[in-house]
Image (cartoon, grey):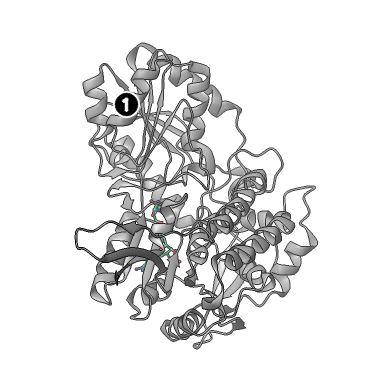
Amino acid sequence: MGISLPPDVTLQPATVNFLRTSPKKLLIGGEWVAPARFETFATFNPATGEELAQTALAGPEDVDRAVQAARDAFENGPWDKLNGEERGRLLWKLADLIETHADELAELETLDNGKPLRVARNGDVPFAVRHFRYYAGLAGKIEGSTIPVSIPNQFVYTRREPMGVVGLIIPWNFPLLMCAWKLAPALACGNTALLKPAEETPLTALRLGELITEAGFPPGVVNILTGPGVPTGAAIVAHMGVDKVAFTGSTEVGREIMKNAALSNLKRVSLELGGKSPNVIFADANLSKAVRGAFWAVFSTSGQECVAGSRLFIERAVYEQVLEGLSAEAQKIRVGSGLTPKVHIGPLISEHQLERVLGYIASGRSGGAQVFKGGERLGGELASGYFLSPTIFTHQDDSLAIVQEEIFGPVVAATAFDDWDELVQRANAVRYGLAAGVWTQDISKAHRFAHTVKAGTVWINGYGYFDAAAPFGGYKESGFGREMGQAAMELYTQVKTIWVGL
Ligand code: NDP
């Protein structure tokens, strides 16, 4: 294993140690075990194209073994004997351990995913910590209700009980954070879990597995299965012993998961899927803030974000001014290895993703949209990685693929609008409904837009804020179910109604 680092950059000894010595096997029933078929796959550094590590590839036999371990842990103690407060204490301990190892986890994230180290260290890792703490607090506060009924002498109450064994399938854009988004509420509610990270980014999930063991979670409560969507993810979805699958990823795979869940044991499914979010700048907005906000709404994490504000609607009176502002922002930012200090934007996750995004850029050009800025793969010292300059398209044709489809790259489709009705019609004219943004100093107009747009989250005069306490999820083909906040407890519990004859 060779890791090329930018000049004057060194890694934490713990990071190097993890990369060199950790076995990167499967965590099943509290043990790190080799996969039944002894297969492995490589994970790469997207900034250099170099292999970082070989990781175990879980097949259907391993999934089966993990389901048995998770079922055993769910039904035969000690996990099922712990009360909510005791589960919360374990989650809090895990949060403390993540905090202690924050530098190392951030470096692993940057190496595996490419995002700037500053973002991983100040964003992803502390946000994951906060998630575990938030659900540590909620674990002992899962309440049922008493229900007044019309039948005399009957007392009716409800309990919220865990689902059982849950499969958690996550993508590569926020590897550690997505583990936290799903594991924290699932465990707070008393479930046991099979966690499948994306094949592109298994490293922080594996390190998290070590910390989960160190925190003292009983064996089998969390099982970590690295491997590709097929066979690993598909085997989790098809397994008759899995009670629920929570998934984040593309709408296409979400559709497949829903179908396969129905064909197996009708397991419960929650889906957080793609987006093509409208971001609207009205002429009365604070333009310097709006321009900066719109720029980062799409270009942070190189556009590889489900909520990316990738359709920019600009009121015609300020259209040219906003475009010039975006261009000036693009001029200022530095694209490069996430390990290089002061880099703002890292690489795309893989060669495949780069080719896919370049394909969209070519289709935008040939469809008649104009490249106002960027649109090229970056060469020179970045040639071995998957770097793309921030790309601003201008267009007036909403039927283009660059306007309708989730590109998941640093590409924004900017367009002018003239009036309210046109704006609302065009903003809602995609199959997705994950998020939206609006910039205006007229607060009535802002709320009016927020109430009209078909999206699960709307940001007014800001973009991309998340908090463990604030529910998040999609409208339309962006999925269903709400993660974060108390809403997520509904994803991981089922309601039991109990009638008592008095
Ligand atoms: P996928 O939707 O394919 O992957 C998400 C997760 O699902 C990964 O862990 C993947 O495994 C797994 N998976 C894939 N196929 C199956 C299956 N049949 N059954 C069960 N699990 C499966 O996203 P990609 O990584 O391929 O990215 C492709 C596009 O998806 C992106 O360009 C983007 O448009 C969208 N996407 C959206 C995300 C979002 O947050 N909304 C996040 C990621 C991607 P593995 O990766 O190991 O094969």
Question: Could you tell me residue 155's position as x and y percent?
Answer: 30, 65
Q: Nearer the viewer, residue 253 or 267?
A: 267
Left or right side of 344 for 455 = left
Label 1 Cα neighbours within 10 Å, binned few <14 / some 14-19 / many ≥20: many
Q: Quadrant of the N terminus?
A: bottom right
Q: Amino acid at mark 1?
A: Phe
Q: Is residue 233 above or below residue 184?
A: below
* Residue 222 lies in quadrant: bottom right
Question: Could you tell me residue 281's position as x and y percent?
Answer: 39, 22
Residue 384 visible in the displayed image: no
Residue 457 visible in the displayed image: yes
Q: Is residue 168 above or below residue 401?
A: below
Q: Nearer the viewer, residue 93 or 21?
A: 93
Question: Could you tell me residue 414's position as x and y percent?
Answer: 36, 28
Q: Is residue 68 above or below residue 475?
A: below
Q: Which residue lies at the image location 21% right of the left edge and 63% below the top edge?
A: 152
Question: Could you tell me residue 287's position as x and y percent?
Answer: 48, 16
Q: Provide the residue designation for mark 1.
A: 449
Q: Which residue lies at the image location 21% right of the left edge and 22% below the top edge?
A: 421
Regarding ligand 1, which quadrant of the image does it lie in?
A: bottom left
Left or right side of 404 for 437 = right
